[in-house]
Amino acid sequence: MADGRELIYFDDSEPFVSGGATRRLDDPRPLGDRFVLTEPDGSTRPVTGPEMRLDPLTGEWIPMASHRMNRTFLPAADACPLCPARTETAGSGYSDGEIPATDYDVVVFENRFPALMQVPGITLEDGWDVDDEPLWAARPAAGRCEVVCFSADHTSSFADLTPRRVRTIVEAWADRTAELGRLPGIQQVFAFENRGREIGVTLPHPHGQIYAFPFVAPRTQAMLRQAAAYRERTGGHLLHDVVEAERRAGTRVVLESEHWVAYVPAAARWPVEVHLAPKRDVLDLPGLDDAERDDLARTYLELLRRLDRFFVEPDAPDGEPGRPIPLPYIAGWHQAVVGEGRELGRLHLQVFSVLRAPGKLKYLAGVESGVGAWISDTTPERIAARLQEVAR
């Protein structure tokens, strides 16, 4: 891209698959070097990138990315930066769009407003103490944030895609997980999608993100601690045994295919929550074989379509049945970490929603936000029963 960011096309349509044509590979925008900041007086200085600070009370790293305050927020459809370049502008420039081609299948690029960024010449070792107090350690937030556009169609959603397109997205997730995991200092790669205004989505175009963390995220740390204690106590693999226990019980299993099983976890915390896991022990997305990737493309679509039938609007006064409510959700891939503790990981997808009833959201207040003590508004068995009920 014009400012040095990387952009990668993943194609599943002709003539691009066979190599008969290629997407536009230059960026005509007049963007400056992202590693150089121009001051109001015209002078320049190197960009140092976002920082992260260690919370001494919890041991958690907190990235500080103040530049994200100015990121794009709910633009009009004709100004969406994730849409393809319009034909009439693609020759000389294309507004504020990020993708120079007039069409694409799947595209991945570095986020223009990253919470984590690797700056040349700056490493995690270049740390300091805030206010010269050793209690408050700080480091460069030297990771990477990428955007994954699932479709050129601004009005579609993931559940609207074809299995062929989802298969391409799986390939993109796997490719980027492998590549990002090789970057210096990266400890965890997390691919996810946020859908719906209720979740806080600021760009409705169907897309997801991938974060390459220079630390292990808090929830992952907690799972690793539990897995290590379980192995010490029983000799078993916790995530493997959880999947097998859910399959034996069967009560909360909502979908099963040749290679995948979807279930509501026995201690689900969200109003709607389901996990999707491979039947074979796989560490991460790159570890899936072709048959598992093909099956995932079909199974995940079926799961999302069921989730989009979970809630229904009230019946109309004239007796017309209410329409299904597209579910706002977060879907995130939990994968084995890059370094220490990698053997304790096992790939699984977590999909959950803050919608607890039509027009009603679960707000994280009081004990949940204050001390992290979760109170569930339903039971896992009720969630599973509804997902079983809406199967077609």
Image (cartoon, grey):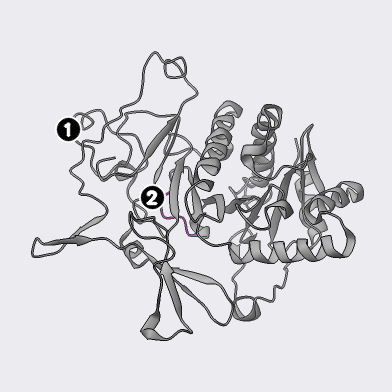
Q: Position of residue 369 (x, y in %)?
A: 59, 76
Picture layout, residue 288 above or below residue 384: above
**Residue bearing the label numbered 1:** 92
Residue shown at the point (47%, 48%) measured from the top left = 183
Label 1's element?
loop
Per the picture, the main secondary structure of the magenta-coloured stretch is loop
Chain part drawn in magenta: 200-204
User: Mark 1 is on which residue type?
Assistant: Ser
**Mark 2: which secondary structure?**
loop
Q: Residues within 10 Å of mark 1 (few under 14, many from 20)?
A: few
User: Who is closer to the viewer here, 41 or 365?
Assistant: 41
Q: Give the amino acid type for the residue marked by disc 2 in the picture.
A: Asn
- How far apart marks 2 and 1 lie (CA) works out to 23 Å
Is any atom of residue 378 visible in this view?
no
Asked if residue 231 lies left or right of residue 77, the reply is: right
Closer to the N terminus: mark 2 or mark 1? 1
Which quarter of the figure has residue 177?
top right
Q: Residue furthest right?
A: 248
Count of labels shown? Answer: 2
Q: Which mark is residue 111?
A: 2
The N terminus - image quarter: top left
Determine crowd level at label 2: few under 14, some 14-19, many 20+ residues with C-alpha closer than 10 A: many
Q: Is residue 256 above or below residue 119?
A: above
